[in-house]
Image (tube, rainbow, N blue to C red):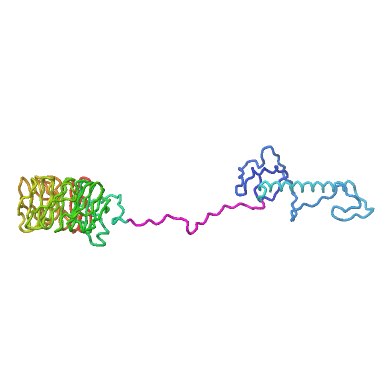
Amino acid sequence: MDTAGDATPLLLSPPVPSPSAVTGPATATAVTPGGDLNPPGWVSSSPTAAMPTFPSSGQATAPLSAGGDSGGRAARGKRRKSGQGGQPNRRRLRWLVIVAVTVVILAGGGGAAFALLGHRSPGEASRGPSKSAPAATPTAGSPTASPTPTNSSSPTPTPSTTSVATGSAGWTYPRFVDQQAFNNNGDTLSGLSCPSATQCFAVDSGGNVLQASAKTAWAVVHTDSANGLNSISCASAKFCVGVDSSGNAIVLSGGTWSDPIAIDTQAQLNDVSCPTASFCVAVDNNGHAFTYTGLVTHWTQAIVDNNGQLTSVSCPSAKFCAAVDSSGYAFIYSGGTWDSGTQLDTSSGFTRVSCPSSAFCMAVDGNGSYAVFSNGHWTEGPVGTSAVRVSCPANGYCVAVDTSGGFSTYQHGSWSSVVKIDGNNTFKALSCSAVATCAGTDSNNNVLYYEPTKN
């Protein structure tokens, strides 16, 4: 098949293909190099050296009659004069040539027509080449793009799955959490409790409760509408109690946080300790202790300290607790009652106490001194730093953090040298769920993790 637009006609062309076999103008059939241009069964004739051409009008010259009479017009349009003789053989040869040329012209014109028709199906000549339909332009109301996502209402950003970089001495670098509370109101994390290495709860002075199931996944899960929270204690990931500066407690039980429950109408609650889901003790700044035994709306009150404010309490079980105050006294709860207290630190008050069992407790005062309870009595000694928070997950083992971004460990009856892990920031909370497994928070709402065997 000739390519579209070729003006040279074939002397013999195949019949017009049926419309179903015609290829559209946009999909012309390619000819294999060296292949046969004619379908099988067709014979082609080679064009002559001097092929006649079509006139500019596209119409062939009309043929003359093969047997013209003497009174007619000559082939070139001149009338013969009467009586003019001629040579018959030459005249017959001229007519044969004219007829042959006419036949060639007509045959060539038909071949050209066939060649042209072979490229167009019926009706396509008037339509012209088809064009691809342009893509529809979306209207103004069409949803051409996904809507821009709105910001999360959580005060913390979406939890990241990236690992936390390891810092000094087995601690991770500080990681900033609870940003909105800190930036908007200056609220700081004031309490921390980690029932396991992968579950932690924290509270801030703005009343927010934060939960983390991994080192990078902190989020606000509840808010105490009454006032700032000072402490939290979790017996498990399903049971926690937080206490606030208005004397209220909030309880996580059965997957739901309670509304604030007023258990102390006279003072603020400073600390709480829950060894189980059925026993908790909270202490206030008037020397009172409040005990929870399973009914969230009922807490029994006891006067423990007439000398100062109770600053911290730690209960490893429902049968034993230790509490310390701002005047350097320590108190023991055993057999359902509190003792009268022992004055241990005459120069400063205790800030925190931690007891992994009834056989061991550790208290620190924030001025470089400690008091340890072992074998039924208290002894004192120097920590070597201004330790303000301490956590003891096992007898004879404790971790303390100070007001200048340092930490120290207590093992084999003595404290290690202090190592800087958090610049010069003051630590506000510390919780160790096991030996060498701790989390701490500072005054800038950073969280740090201590796992020297895993970092």
Instruction: Answer with left or right where residue 307 lies relative to residue 263.
Output: left
From where the camera sits, is residue 284 visible?
yes
Assign the magenta stretch its main secondary structure. loop
Instruction: Answer with left or right where residue 233 lies relative to residue 5.
Output: left
Percent x, y for residue 89?
Answer: 88, 46
From where the camera sits, is residue 170 visible?
no
Percent x, y for residue 45?
Answer: 72, 42
Judge by depth and name the residue closer to the eye, 39 or 244. Answer: 244
Q: Which of the 4 image quadrants contains residue 359?
A: top left
Judge by depth and name the residue closer to the eye, 335 or 147. Answer: 335
Q: Is residue 162 magenta?
A: no
Percent x, y for residue 74?
Answer: 87, 53
Relative vertical location of residue 277 with respect to residue 191 in this rendering, above or below: above
Q: Which of the 4 image quadrants contains residue 405?
A: bottom left
Instruction: Answer with left or right where residue 88 lies relative to residue 342.
Output: right
Judge by depth and name the residue closer to the eye, 395 or 288. Answer: 288
Which region shows up in magenta? Answer: 125-152
Most distant residue in the right direction: 83
Instruction: Answer with left or right where residue 432 lies relative to residue 81.
Output: left
Percent x, y for residue 17?
Answer: 67, 43
